[in-house]
Every structure is written in C-alpha cells, then in structure tokens.
Image (cartoon, rainbow, N blue to C red):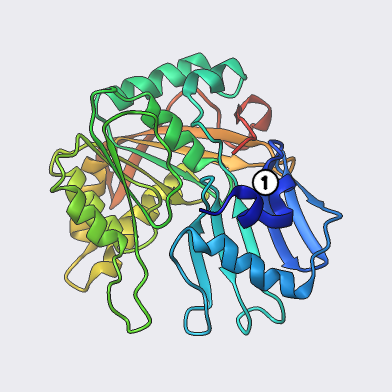
Amino acid sequence: MLTKEIWAGRLINLLEDNEIDEIWINDPDHVFVSRRGVTQLTDLVLENDELITMIDLLLRHSGRRVDRSQPFVDATLPDGSRLHIVIPDITKKYPAINIRKYPALPLRLSQLVSSSALTQAAADFLVECVRAGENLLIAGGTGSGKTTLLNALLEAADPNERVIVCEEVREINLTRADWVSMQTRTASVEGAGGVDLRALVVESLRMRPDRIVVGEVRQREALDLLIALNCGTPGMGTIHANSAKEAITKISTLPLLAGQNVSLDFVIPTVASAIDVVIFVQKLNTGKRKVSEIVRVTGEITDGEIQLELQNFVTRARDLDAIVELVTSI
C-alpha cells in the first residue's frame, strides 16, 4: 500500500497545508496554489521527468488511466482530494495537473453558522427543507463551494435516511451509517465497460433510496434525475450556473440532450414540479465564497417561464456587503 509520503511526493507539504484549497501545476517551474481562495505561485520547482512519475503515483490508487488515447482524466486521491490531469499534445509541452482538496471530515451547517458563514435563519430554513424531503439544487461557478454546501446539507438530513450518491468522481463524504457512494467508470482501451451518470441514477432507484444525490448535473443525466424526483424520491444536486434563475434555465435545457423525443413542453412543467429550492453560491475576487440567493420554485409557469420567489435570508448578488459568506476551506 502506498503511503501518502510516496504517492504525494514533493507535493505533500502543500497537501497537508490546511490553508490551501487547490494546487495546480502548469509546468515544472510553475506550481500554483489557492490559499484561502487567493492564487499564489509557490517556490516549488519540479524536474521534468518527475512530472511523469508523479502522475503515475497519483493515479495508482484510482485505477484510472491517462494516455494518448485518453489524454485527460478525473480521479480521487487516497485522501479524498479531486485530481484532474491533461497531457500533451492536448496541452502544449507539459502535463497540466489540478488537485482540489476537501476537508477530511465534512463541514456542518452549525459550523458555517458559528463561523458567521451562514445566518441561523438561513440554516434553519434549509434544514427544514431537507428534512421535509424537498428537492434542492445548488448552483454556482467552479470552486464556489457547491459541493461543500451540499455535503453540509446532507449531514443535516435525518440520520435514518438511506442516501445514494452518484458522481463522476467521488467528492461527497458523509458520516452517516446508511449511504452508498457510486462513481462513473471510463471505458477500457477496447471501448467496453464504461458507466455514465445516467446509468448510476437509474441504478440508484433500485437501491431503496430515501434520497438521491447527483454530485454535479452536467448533461443528459438531468432527465433521469428529474424523472426520479417526479417519482417521489427526494433528491439534491449541484449545477454550474451564474444565478438561481440561470440554474433553472439550464436544468430545463440539459434534458433535451437525451434525445429528440424530449421536448420543452415536457421538461419545463417537470422542472417546475420537481425542484423546490435553488441556492446560488459564488466566489468573489477576494477568494471568499458567498451565498447570494436562496429562491423557492413556486411551481407556476408564466409565458413558458418558471416562476421563482426570492427568500429574504440573503440579498441579491449586487448587494455584496449583505451577502452571507461561506467558509473558504472548500
């Protein structure tokens, strides 16, 4: 078994620094970190051949591969960090490596409140939504804190719930006893054995779920998730979007990728009835993550547009001084 000192190599000090939330390598001379959300160039300089050895060691635990036929890969490191690698000739000369770190133990909403990261009123509202079995969608950009907030909300669910998690790469980490984590699998060199998110969502319905979670809704799996939610199984997930309204627009259009027989006439009413609350989080230029919107989906449709109702726990994104902050250790 590889120890952390072996698979992390000379990155170990960066990985063990709790103030660093992300590490990325552009070339051997340029190793960057995000320290409390602020980008810094480190003084770490690698050898050219060291990058190749590093990639092999970082991937060994995951069982995933990167080569000319598959020049990029997502994987999970033994400590739970998320790894992304792109190799030449997709990149120009050197591999590009990103490592996004996550807390060893999931943050709870109570921690966010005690850190002035979330108001008690907003936390109470979200806990009530979760325990009532409402369907929540968390929206935001890359690194905005979507997964951290999702994890905290799942920790607030009834401990007797059976939670089934579907992800492309494992990021969610729960402390409850009854939960299953499933991740996608890339196809072999021969093109066989691949398992996508759509398959995981379908399989999750056969696993006696009390709640289904899709770590990130990106493509056609949006249709399967909406169908599952409309069958009465509570669910949660995240999505890339620039506002709560754009998140609803996106979750209404992604199902169209599933095939020509899927139409907006079906999808829009389905979204209006399936999604209950949208939470929008954002990362500011200072590196701070903030919750800028909590909206309720009313279920009403006017001129083809799903109606949203802004909750009064946070202000609109333009009033930045009044926005609730999320902790930066995401």
Q: In the displayed structure, does residue 231 sit left or right of residue 67?
A: left
Q: Is residue 5 above or below residue 211?
A: below
Residue positioned 71% across, 76% down in the render: 94
Count of all numbered marks drawn on residues in the image: 1
Would you say residue 224 is visible in this rendering?
yes
- Nearer the observer, 37 or 181: 181
The x, y position of residue 111, in whole percent, is 54, 20
Residue 320: percent from the left, percent from the top?
A: 66, 32
- Within the image, what quadrant is residue 211 found in? top left
Rendered residue at 50%/31% (across/down)? 105
**In the shown orientation, is residue 24 left or right of residue 193?**
right
User: Going 46% across and 46% down the picture, which residue do you hit?
Assistant: 171
List x then y, in percent, for residue 25: 71, 63
State whether residue 120 is above or below residue 145: above
Choose top left, top right, bottom left or bottom right for residue 112. top right
Q: Nearer the viewer, residue 25 or 51?
A: 51
Q: Is residue 86 above or below residue 102?
A: below
Identify the image quadrant of the C terminus: top right
Q: Mark 1 Cα within 10 Å, few/some/many (few <14, many 20+)?
A: many
| Location of residue 45 (image quadrant) | bottom right
Percent across and percent down for residue 152 are 45, 30
Residue at the far right: name it: 43
Q: Residue at x 35, y 63 (%)?
A: 219
Residue 96 seen in this snapshot: no
Is 313 located above or below residue 57 in the figure? above
Which residue carries the number 1 mark? 15
Does residue 10 appear to the left or right of 21 in the view shown? right
The residue tagged with tag 1: helix, strand or loop? helix
What's the residue type where badge 1 is placed?
A: Leu
